[in-house]
Image (cartoon, rainbow, N blue to C red):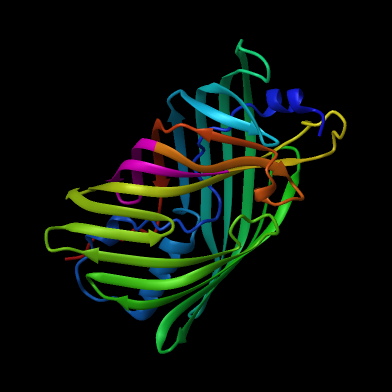
Amino acid sequence: MKHLKQFFLLVFVIPAIPSSTFAQAGKDSLAAQKQSGTQDSIARKVLAYANNKFALARPFNVEYTNMSPYRYASKLEGTSLPESKATRFSQLKLSTNFNLIRKKTWLLGATIAYRYTDIGANLVGPGSTAPKSVDGQFHYHASALNFTYFSKLFNKTTIYTGSLMVDGSEKHFERLTGLVTGTIILKANARTKVAVGMVISVDPSAQLPFIPTFTYEHKFNNGLIADMILPKQLLLRKVIHKNGRLSLGTELDRSGFYLYNLDPNNPSQKYEYRQVDLNNGLVYEHLIGSHFVATARTGIRATISSGIFEKEKKFGDAVFETTPKPGFYFNIGLSYNPFIKKKTK
């Protein structure tokens, strides 16, 4: 490719963007954490597990994220570029998740997500020492049809899911992908939940098409809760008063959006950006009324991998890679869940 300078100026920096794609979210409701130790029916447990571990988010969720300025290194087609600085990052994210058909042994639902990202940077181009100020705004949307089936395997409750997803930008629908999961619940009682499974991505561009999963949740006598969903999150939770919960740990996020008109010699070529981050720090959730949950997150975000590649190729064939330095971030959100049940005496 012979458009290095223009390519560099157009794609500039890709900051850490929280995931709103269809990964296992694993967010138990505050109401569920406050329920008594009475054991639920198998059907109730399975539905709760499916909703918490396999849905995009709560039925409706809106979030705002801001990140402090940070420096980053980058490579263009394997050539290192001068260190630059991301000066601005903010993002608005909206998502909804709802059931279409609900039966005894299966569930059909849908998810819809939208993300708006505003970013800016001071860039130092190849062979230059003077920074150039650039900015950009990106729109990303994703929708999925999700099928969940409840069964038994080795006499253990097993959940199978299949998702068909289409995503894109404000300009086009871009990619049709699929996701298949299988999860065996090994143990589920009032104190401990253990499950193992796998995720298979039906996406030719996937960085990891097959991922094993492990879920472990345990309530200690002192009120602490270990909440592990590998590779998604590792958290230590504590209900700190009647309507609040504080968590400490790390969460894995994946982000992506599409880019256009980067190659003047081939303007029809489309590109995709993907990034994987670790959000390390605190999460506070507060139940407002009966059905609203306010959430605040803050801490340090570290990027594991990030890059831009041609849409038809794999993530490993990235033509532009960035290595952001860890930076401070905060996130505030509000979710609505009409299915939260009040604690019964």
Q: Is residue 340 above or below residue 1?
A: below
**Residue 306, located in which quarter of the rendered image?**
top right
Q: Residue furthest bottom?
A: 155
Residue 80 in the image: state x and y as whole percent: 62, 30
- The stretch in magenta equals 275-300
Residue 240, position as x, y percentages in the image: 17, 48
Please state the horizontal and vertical placement of residue 23, each as a whole percent of the image. Answer: 51, 56
The quarter holding residue 329 reads top left
Task: Give the residue at the far top of this rendering.
Answer: 130
Q: Residue furthest right?
A: 265
Residue 342 shows up from this direction: no
- Quadrant housing residue 342: bottom left
Q: Main secondary structure of the magenta part?
A: strand
State the residue in front, 152 or 255: 255
x, y percentage for residue 326?
42, 33
- Side (left or right) of 78 relative to 298: right
| Residue at x 40% of width, y 74% of height | 46
Q: Which residue is at 56% across, 50% downward?
A: 21
The number of numbered badges drawn on the structure is 0
Q: Is residue 172 above or below residue 2?
A: below
Residue closer to the observer: 110 or 75: 75
Q: Quadrant of the N terminus?
A: top right
**Residue at horizontal 68%, vertical 17%?**
127
- Quarter occupied by the C terminus: bottom left
- Is residue 152 at all visible to an observer of this figure? yes
User: For residue 78: magenta?
Assistant: no
